[in-house]
Amino acid sequence: MLTAILVAAGYVAGSMTWGYWLVRVFHGEDVRTKGSGNIGATNVWRVYGRTLGIPAVLLDTAKGFVPALLGVLLVGHGTGVLAGAAAMLGHWRPLFLGFRKGGKMVATAGGAFLGVAAPVGAAAAGVWLLVFAVGRYASLASILAAASLPLWAWLLGYPWPVVAFGGFAALAVLLLHRVNLRRLARGEESRFRGFRRGEPKSAASP
């Protein structure tokens, strides 16, 4: 029963569309009409700069972290995995947007792993930072960081639900970035330059 409650709470937490809400509150605009049209933190950062981008990143991460951590602490790794996965699902198809298209799960997945297996989440975050620093492609950094999750979970000796969760997260992030992969293959993906307010030159998004 507690597991079911935590999973439901994870989905509700994941459905909290912070990027959309922050832009509505501070600019009175719909972020879905800006940049790439995505409600995730990266598009918010690209269009509105770090002032809204940083809070969006932190809040999208927290909504994966809190349910997953509670699941681990109150029940165990299996429940933490389920609650974290539910938060990711909520971010992708949020209740508060009528189950319409949400974000691409990257920050929420990272938060979920920090809650379930903090060293794994930290290692994947390191991969993201390294790839991003070298190439400035947020999409490629997200894909490779997610792909590293099951490997880190296995290398660090976590139980099979955590390794399987890493595989699920990697596949989900890959599928949601398939358009970006095609643009990367064609050399058309835009590098991230969203460190000040203003629309990106391209509508491409991670």
Image (cartoon, grey):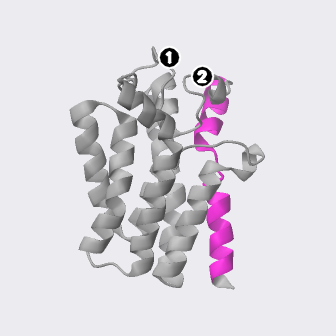
**Residue 23 lies in magenta, yes or no?**
yes
Q: Looking at the picture, tell me which residue is in the foreground, 46 or 24.
A: 46
Mark linked to residue 124: none
**Place of residue 171 in the rendered image (x, y in percent of width and height, measured from the top left):** 47, 56
Mark linked to residue 34: 2
Q: Which residue lies furthest to the right in this view?
A: 98
* Residue at point 45%, 14% (across, down): 201
- Give the dominant element type of the magenta stretch: helix, strand or loop: helix
Callout 1: SS: loop
Per the image, the residue denoted by label 1 is 199
**Place of residue 196 in the rendered image (x, y in percent of width and height, measured from the top left):** 40, 20
- Residue 103 in sight from this viewpoint: yes
Task: Give the residue type at disc 1.
Answer: Glu
User: In what quadrant of the picture does the N terminus appear?
Assistant: bottom right
Disc 1 to disc 2: CB gap under 8 Å: yes
**Place of residue 160 in the rendered image (x, y in percent of width and height, measured from the top left):** 40, 80
Task: Residue 164: name its quadrant.
Answer: bottom left
User: In what quadrant of the picture does the C terminus appear?
Assistant: top left
Residue 172 to residue 6: above or below = above
- Residue 70 in sight from this viewpoint: no
Task: Give the residue type at disc 2.
Answer: Lys
Q: How far apart are marks 1 and 2 (CA)?
A: 8 Å
**Residue 14 lies in magenta, yes or no?**
yes
Magenta-drawn segment: 3-27
**Place of residue 102 in the rendered image (x, y in percent of width and height, measured from the top left):** 63, 43
* Residue at point 55%, 64% (across, down): 85
* Residue at point 33%, 48% (across, down): 144
